[in-house]
């Protein structure tokens, strides 16, 4: 039996008009912050100069924190719904990844 439960707060109502409302703006900002953190992450992986790396890391952290704050606001207002994890699927995924560990070059030595 599939679990269709969701985790969500009561939804704060917004006007349903062609104009963007608070939920639309928050969703747009959250999408932008997600894109920016992914982009900064790529830049961090390729920064060869330590000073540049530190500046990018600082900006990345600020952006990541803003993304998390937007997520928290949207979740509190009921505009962001999470699906409850299905325990059987989680167990299957865990077992599958345990099997992958046998393919590591140094055996099953995960620390």
Image (cartoon, rainbow, N blue to C red):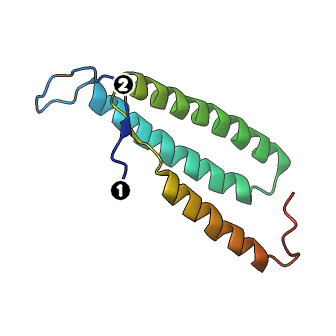
Q: Identify residue for label 1.
A: 1
> Residue 90 sits in which quadrant?
bottom right
Q: Within 10 Å of the Cα at label 2, are there few (<14), some (14-19), or many (20+) other Cα atoms?
A: some
In this view, the residue farthest toward the left is 17
Nearer to us in this view, 15 or 50: 15
Disc on res. 9 = 2
Q: Quadrant of the N terminus?
A: bottom left
Q: Residue at x 27, y 20 (%)?
A: 12
> Residue 37 sits in which quadrant?
top right
- Tag in front: 2 or 1: 1
Q: Residue at x 72, y 41 (%)?
A: 57
Left or right for 16, reference 62: left
Rendering coords of residue 45 (x, y %): 72, 57
- Marks 2 and 1 sit apart, C-alpha to C-alpha, by 25 Å
Secondary structure found at label 1:
loop
Q: Residue at x 84, y 70 (%)?
A: 108
Vertical comparison of 32 with 48: above or below: above
Rendering coords of residue 109 (x, y %): 88, 66
Mark 2 vs 1, N-terminal side: 1
């Amino acid at each position: 039996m599939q679990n269709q439960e969701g985790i969500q707060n009561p939804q704060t109502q917004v006007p349903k008009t062609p104009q963007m409302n608070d939920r639309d703006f928050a969703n747009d900002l959250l999408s932008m912050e997600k894109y920016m953190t992914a982009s900064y992450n790529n830049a961090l992986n390729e920064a060869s100069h330590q000073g540049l790396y530190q500046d990018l890391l600082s900006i990345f952290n600020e952006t990541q924190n803003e993304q998390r704050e937007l997520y928290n606001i949207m979740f509190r207002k009921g505009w962001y719904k999470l699906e409850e994890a299905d325990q059987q699927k989680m167990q299957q995924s865990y077992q599958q990844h345990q099997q992958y560990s046998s393919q590591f070059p140094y055996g099953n030595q995960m620390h």
